[in-house]
Image (spheres, rainbow, N blue to C red):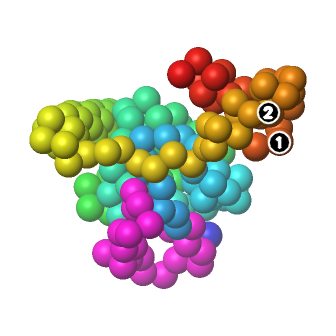
Amino acid sequence: MRVGYRRVSSEGQNLDRQEFDNVERVFEEKVSGATRNRPALSEMIAFVREGDQVLVTSIDRMARDLRDLQNIVTELNDKGVDVEFLHERLRFTNKDHDPLSRLQLHMMGAFAEFERSIIRKRQAEGIAKAKARGAYKGRKATIDGDNIRRMKSAGTSVSDIARAMNISRMSVYRYLGE
């Protein structure tokens, strides 16, 4: 079975550029590649079987971290699943251990990771400049700090507050410490 995997980093982005020919199933998601916590990726890995082929338009669509990329490709190959990156024209199988392809995977994965770190650095610089001129306020609070303090004053335990507000205990401690 030929399976496609498509990913973009955010809801506002579009998956149309990542197209496949002759695939029987496509797994897609709109979530950052910097995290391994991606439901469609996990579902795809669980779905594929020995002899299947996973198509991905580009290495950076699979992962933005070199170690994560290597782990995903190895996990799929260990299941007997081939992985093919279309733009890079690279294919990885558990049968064919082409040293040049592995080198290219590592280099392209390293470039994707480097690109991600540059993006984060530029983002941090932009936020710092916006804060300096008073244009950046941060995101709006999603947790009601006053309610946390009221509940704590009423004698409610931190664990009970966290459960009642559906947040972590650490978030409760953070608000109580301010």
Q: Indicate the position of residue 4 as horizontal and vertical percent values.
A: 50, 68
Look at the numbered discs 1 and 2 and tell me whether their residues touch, using CB distance below 8 Å: yes
Closest to the camera, between mark 1 and mark 2, is 2
Specify the farthest residue to the top.
Answer: 177
What residue is shown at x 38% (from left), y 35% (from top)?
65
Q: Can residue 118 be seen in this view?
A: no
Q: What element carries label 1?
A: helix
Q: In this view, does 131 lie to the left or right of 93?
A: left
Which is more N-terminal, label 2 or label 1? 2
Asked if residue 25 is positioned above or below residue 58 in the image, the reply reads: below
Asked if residue 7 is positioned above or below residue 151 in the image, the reply reads: below
What residue is shown at x 47% (from left), y 35% (from top)?
68
> Could you tell me the amino acid type at mark 1?
Ala
Q: Indicate the position of residue 138 as horizontal and vertical percent values.
A: 36, 44
Q: Is residue 155 visible?
A: yes
What residue is shown at x 33% (from left), y 50% (from top)?
60
Asked if residue 45 is positioned above or below residue 15 in the image, the reply reads: above
Q: Is residue 169 left or right of residue 133?
A: right
Tag shown at residue 151: 2
Q: Give the range drawn in magenta.
A: 4-27
Looking at the rendering, in which quadrant would you find the N terminus? bottom right
Asked if residue 134 is positioned above or below residue 156 in the image, the reply reads: below
- Judge whether residue 114 is colored magenta: no
Q: What residue sits right under mark 1 in the picture?
A: 164
> Could you tell me the amino acid type at mark 2?
Met
Q: Distance between the residues labelled 1 and 2?
A: 10 Å
- Judge whether residue 20 is colored magenta: yes
- Camera-side residue of 178 and 1: 178
Q: Indicate the position of residue 26 as horizontal and vertical percent values.
A: 55, 72
Tag shown at residue 8: none
